[in-house]
Image (tube, rainbow, N blue to C red):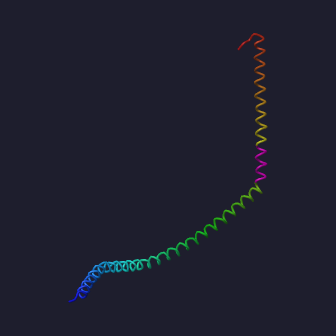
Amino acid sequence: MSVGEVAGLIAACALLILVGLLAYPILKLGKVFDETRILVKGVSDETVPLLGEVTTTVATTNAQLLKVDTITDNASTVTTNAAALTSLFAATAGGPLVKAAAFSYGVRRALGESQRRDVSRRVKEEMKAERKAKKRGDVR
């Protein structure tokens, strides 16, 4: 064996050791890829039924929203009709009711003034009588 053959043999052994050292991480990396493939397969298997449920939920929600839209439209119609009825009532009965209220207020005020005048007249008469009594010497 010559020196070149020995050097070649040493280089081949070193290369074999290097390949052996590099093979271990590559094998570990292969296992990681296998686990990743299994995980992606599981996620895709679970996602398909979930998407089906989401589609069903969205369809049901849209149906319910259509019902709510119908209810909202009916409520809007009722509100419009109530506003029209209120306007009609105010136009037809509002004027006479205001006139009747004003008349009753005027009658109450007139009767109140009459009673106040009567009370004021009686008080003045009593005060006048007391003054006359004092002048005469009759004190109550």
* Towards the viewer: 5 or 96: 5
In the rendered image, the quadrant that contains the N terminus is bottom left
Q: Quadrant of residue 129?
A: top right
As displayed, is residue 102 above or below residue 42? above
Quarter location, residue 140: top right
Residue 8 x/y as whole percent: 26, 86
Q: Nearer the viewer, residue 61 or 3?
A: 3
Residue at the top extreme?
137
**In-front residue for pair 112/7:** 7
The relative height of residue 114 versus residue 8 in the rendered view (above or below) is above
Is 91 left or right of 32, judged from the image as shown? right
Whether 100 is among the magenta residues is yes
Vertical arrangement, residue 15 with respect to residue 100, above or below: below
Residue 109: within the magenta? no
| Residue shown at the point (78%, 52%) measured from the top left | 96
Q: Residue lying furthest front in this view?
A: 3
How many dots with numbers? Answer: 0
The residue under the point 78% across, 30% down is: 117
Give percent across and percent down for residue 138. 74, 11
Q: Residue furthest bottom?
A: 1
Residue 115: x percent and y percent? 76, 32
Residue shown at the point (72%, 12%) measured from the top left = 139
Q: Residue 90 falls in which quadrant of the image?
A: bottom right
> Seen in the image, is 125 located left or right of residue 16?
right
Predominant secondary structure, magenta span: helix
The image shows residue 122 at horizontal and vertical percentages of 76, 25
Q: Give above or below for 86 relative to 100.
A: below
Magenta stretch bounds? 94-104
